[in-house]
Each structure stands twice: as C-alpha cells, then as structure tokens.
Image: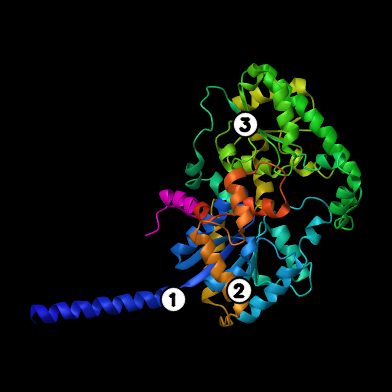
C-alpha cells in the first residue's frame, strides 16, 4: 500500500472514530443533581458527580430553580432532588415519568429523633408524587419509607449514608486539611443551635405561620412558643460559656452560628468585646462546616446537633453544652455519648481533659453503634454508593426515555445554557445580576434575591470537581 492510500485509510479511520465519539456523546447517559445549599451540599454532590463520571454518566449540578429548565438543556436520564415536598415538584415528577426520566431523592436531613417526625418525613406530602429511587441516610428511615409506600418498589429505597460526610474520612478529608488560622493554641470549634430564638423578637404571626404546618406532627411542635423561649434562654447561657472560654486566654475559639440564626446577635456580641478578647476569637458564618471540623482540635455543640456526629466521624473529641433540655433540642440518646457541661465554670477543665484524652474511649463503642444506626456507614463511600445506584438504574430502567420538548421547555433550556455561558444560574434576571455586581449581599434582601445569591454557579461546580480530581483523577 502506497503512502497516499495509507494516508487515506488513516483519514477514514479517524473520521470513523470521530463519528463514533460524536454518537457516543449524543447518547451518553446524563444525570442532573439539584443543589439546595451551596455551602452545605455542593462538595457532596460534586463527589457523586465525580463517581458518576467514572461510570460513564455525564452529570450536571444545578440549583433547584432549574427543575424545569434542565429538561430542555440536558435531556437527562435521571434527576436527583433533595425533596419532592412541593406541589409543583410532585406534578413535575409525573411528567418526568411520562418522559421516561428517572426521579430520585437524596434528603438534606435524614436523622429524625423527635417522636412523630420520622413517620411524617417518610410519607408523600402529595398523593401524585412519583419517586423511582430514594437514597436515605439510615435504616430507620428506610423502614418507615417502606411502610408508607413512598416508592413503588421497596428495593428502590436504599440506605447509603451521607455523601457530604465522606469528607471526614480519607482520602477526601485531605481537601480540607488546611488550618484556617496560624496559631499555636488549640482550635476550639463551637457550634451554636438557636435557630428559633429570632421568632421571640418578631410579631407572633411569623412563628404562627412557620409552625402552623407542623403542629399536627408532634406535641413538641404544637407547643412551639415553649421551644422558642428555651432557644432564647439557651442562647443567653451560651454566651456565658463563650465568655469562660475567652477569659481562659489559651484557646483559639471559632464560633459557628447555625445558618438559620440571626447573625446580628453574634456581631453585636463580638463588637462588645475588647480588642484583646477578639484577638483569638473568630465568627464563622459562611465557611464550610466540614473544613472547620477537620481543622479543629475539639468540637463543642449545643445540646443536640448533627455537627456532633460529624465530629465523631472525624475522630474529634466533643463536649455538649446543656441548657433547658427541651425535647426540641435535647436528645437523651445522644447525651449519653459525650461529656455534658451545664456550668461555664467547669468548661475549661473539661476541655483540657478532652484535649489530653482525645479518643474519649469511654464513649467510643456507643458512638459507633449510634452512627451505624443513624448514618448507616462511616466509611467515606456514601457518594460512591449513590453514584453506583444511579448508574445501575439508568442502565436497567424499564421504560424508554421519550422527551418531546414543547416551546416552553425549549425556551427555558436555552435560557439555562445562555445563563451558564455568562457564569450565572438559570433564574438570573438583569436587576438581580447588577445588584450582585454593585451591592453584593448588602441591604435588605427579597426572598428572590436571597435564593439567587445562594444558588450554585458553573464556576462553583468546576472548582469543586477540580478539587476532587486532585485527590482522585478521572482517566
């Protein structure tokens, strides 16, 4: 064969490879995961997307506001929501069923200690809700979901653990091992949990409207004003404990308020301190909680808080601050698994003892049993389990994908792609865009603007996935 014929053969082969690659791309399986909270959920969902990519499934991360637009933009095979508790999402789930798109749910929260909340969070809020797969945190939730018939097939209700908790184990925790401060003092992370306190200082209608939908779930919710009062009292006593930490002058203290707390309370308190008192104190409102826990020496929580379990996974010693012991916040089952402090004068000595004995061996066996019950496995593979189930679901689905786009779906999909080209979420509007550019998060914010600010952007997704690839490259 001459050089000319050889060259022509290679050209034909390369064209054939190009056509096959294009065909494979057009027919590549696709999943979309909706990210509710950027600071809390982005890294966990990005890790799921990473494992899906290794299984040949293209995955897009989008804000929940893209629930309709993603159909025209990506024509997905699988949609993963964090809930289907809104009426419009329930109706949409039926449309997805007709299109042959698989619908899954991975809850943001999956530990339900309070009586009545497990069953309430395990049943459909709307009869027409359709769900193909539900990936729950633990076996108690799975059993309750099966009893309620949440999915047509019980085998598709699968306990997987908590993907965002994977970053407390190796190799993923390496991504967060970077101390937030340069200090030779022990770093004490203090997580507050007074998300109801602000209702005390608002007109009663705000609390009535917020709790009205929950009063039938449990007597604890029905008596919500007592819970609000307990939250206010606990917050005041919490400041007394912080004052004891600062007065000891031998720790670097990071205070992490609950995301739903009023930040002004802590800002005002911080400003009331002297310059010397603030020198080894930091308020952390927006930092990733996983990064804070990984780089702390000890974690302090307020009565019941999920951060306590997160610290246990990360092998950090913990102490629980005790206030009113209201059942809305205090769980005896958890209280037995860590040293409790109800007196600020005892806190410093308890911290020093925990730092000297970080394994807290007296509690180790009970903590492991509790975590296996409520977060299934603490092996760092929850994200991979979700990805494996999604990939298997797409490969073995029993109904074909038949998406017939109308003009509305096509228009929304085009807007999503156009917005991504500018690095924005699909629900961007000119007024929102320019306000973010020139004012950021200053001033009074509408609900629409807050939703826009918290939404993930393409750059957030790229950054998260690039970080993950530094630990586990995709070939």
Q: Is residue 467 magenta?
A: yes
Label 2 SS: strand
Look at discs 3 and 2 and give the one toward the viewer: 2
Which residue is rendered at x = 57% and y = 78% of the image? 397
Marks 1 and 2 sit apart, C-alpha to C-alpha, by 19 Å
Marks 3 and 2 sit apart, C-alpha to C-alpha, by 42 Å
Say which residue label 1 marks.
Answer: 26
**Label 2: how many residues lie within 10 Å, few (<14), some (14-19) or many (20+)?**
many
Say which residue label 3 marks.
Answer: 298
Q: Nearer the viewer, residue 451 or 87?
A: 451
The answer to the question of whether label 3 and label 1 lie on touching residues, with beta carbons closer than 8 A, is: no
Q: Is residue 153 visible?
A: no
Whichever of callouts 3 and 2 sits on the residue coming sooner in the sequence is 2
Q: Residue 443: image x %, image y %? A: 69, 42
Look at discs 3 and 1 and give the one toward the viewer: 1
Mark seen at residue 102 = 2
Look at discs 1 and 2 and give the one toward the viewer: 1
Q: Residue 35: image x %, image y %? A: 61, 57
Marks 3 and 1 sit apart, C-alpha to C-alpha, by 50 Å
Which residue is rendered at x = 17% and y = 80% of the image? 8
Label 3 SS: strand
Task: Tell me which segment is drawn in magenta.
Answer: 462-475
Q: Quadrant of residue 64?
A: bottom right
Which residue is rendered at x = 64% and y = 22% of the image? 278
Q: Is residue 167 magenta?
A: no
Whichever of callouts 3 and 1 sits on the residue coming sooner in the sequence is 1
Q: Nearer the viewer, residue 324 or 81?
A: 81
Which quarter of the rendered picture does the C terminus lie within? bottom left
Q: Nearer the viewer, residue 334 or 191?
A: 191
């Amino acid at each position: 064969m001459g050089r000319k014929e050889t060259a022509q053969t290679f050209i034909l082969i390369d064209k054939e490879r190009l056509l096959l690659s294009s065909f494979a791309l057009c027919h590549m399986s696709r999943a979309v995961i909706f990210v509710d909270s950027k600071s809390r959920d982005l890294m966990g969902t990005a890790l799921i997307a990473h494992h899906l990519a290794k299984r040949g499934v293209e995955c897009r991360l989008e804000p929940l506001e893209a629930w309709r637009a993603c159909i025209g933009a990506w024509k997905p095979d699988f949609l993963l929501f964090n809930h289907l508790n809104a009426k419009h999402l329930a109706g949409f789930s039926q449309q997805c069923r007709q299109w042959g798109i698989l619908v899954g749910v991975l809850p943001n929260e999956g530990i339900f200690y309070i009586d009545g909340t497990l069953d309430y969070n395990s049943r459909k809020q709307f009869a027409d809700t359709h769900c193909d797969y539900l990936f729950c945190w633990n076996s108690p939730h799975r059993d309750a979901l099966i009893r309620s018939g949440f999915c047509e097939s019980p085998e598709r209700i699968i306990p997987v653990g908590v993907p965002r908790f994977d970053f407390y184990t190796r190799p993923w925790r390496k991504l967060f091992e970077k101390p937030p401060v340069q200090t030779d003092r022990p770093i004490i992370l203090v997580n507050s949990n007074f998300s109801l306190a602000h209702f005390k200082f608002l007109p009663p209608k705000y609390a009535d409207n917020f709790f009205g939908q929950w009063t039938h779930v449990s007597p604890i919710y029905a008596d919500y004003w007592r819970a609000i009062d307990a939250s206010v009292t606990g917050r005041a006593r919490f400041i007394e404990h912080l004052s004891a930490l600062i007065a000891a002058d031998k720790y670097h203290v990071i205070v992490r308020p609950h995301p739903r707390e009023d930040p002004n309370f802590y800002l005002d308190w911080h400003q009331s301190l002297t310059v010397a008192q603030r020198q080894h104190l930091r308020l952390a409102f927006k930092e990733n909680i996983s990064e804070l826990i990984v780089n702390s020496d000890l974690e302090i929580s307020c009565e019941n808080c999920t951060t306590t379990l997160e610290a246990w996974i990360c092998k950090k010693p913990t102490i629980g601050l005790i206030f009113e012991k209201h059942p809305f916040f205090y769980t005896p089952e958890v209280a037995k698994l860590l040293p409790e402090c109800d007196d600020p004068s005892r806190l410093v000595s308890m911290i020093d003892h925990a730092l000297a004995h970080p394994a807290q061996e007296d509690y180790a066996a009970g903590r492991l049993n509790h975590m296996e019950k409520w977060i299934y496995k603490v092996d760092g593979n929850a994200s991979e389990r979700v990805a494996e189930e999604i990939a298997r679901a797409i490969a073995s689905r029993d109904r074909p994908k038949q998406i017939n786009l109308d003009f509305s779906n096509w228009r929304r999909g085009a807007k999503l792609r156009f917005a991504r080209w500018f690095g924005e979420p699909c629900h961007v509007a000119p007024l929102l865009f320019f306000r973010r550019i020139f004012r950021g998060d200053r001033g009074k914010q509408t609900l629409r603007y807050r939703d826009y600010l918290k939404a993930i952007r393409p750059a957030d997704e790229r950054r998260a996935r690039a970080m993950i690839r530094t630990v586990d490259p995709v070939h």
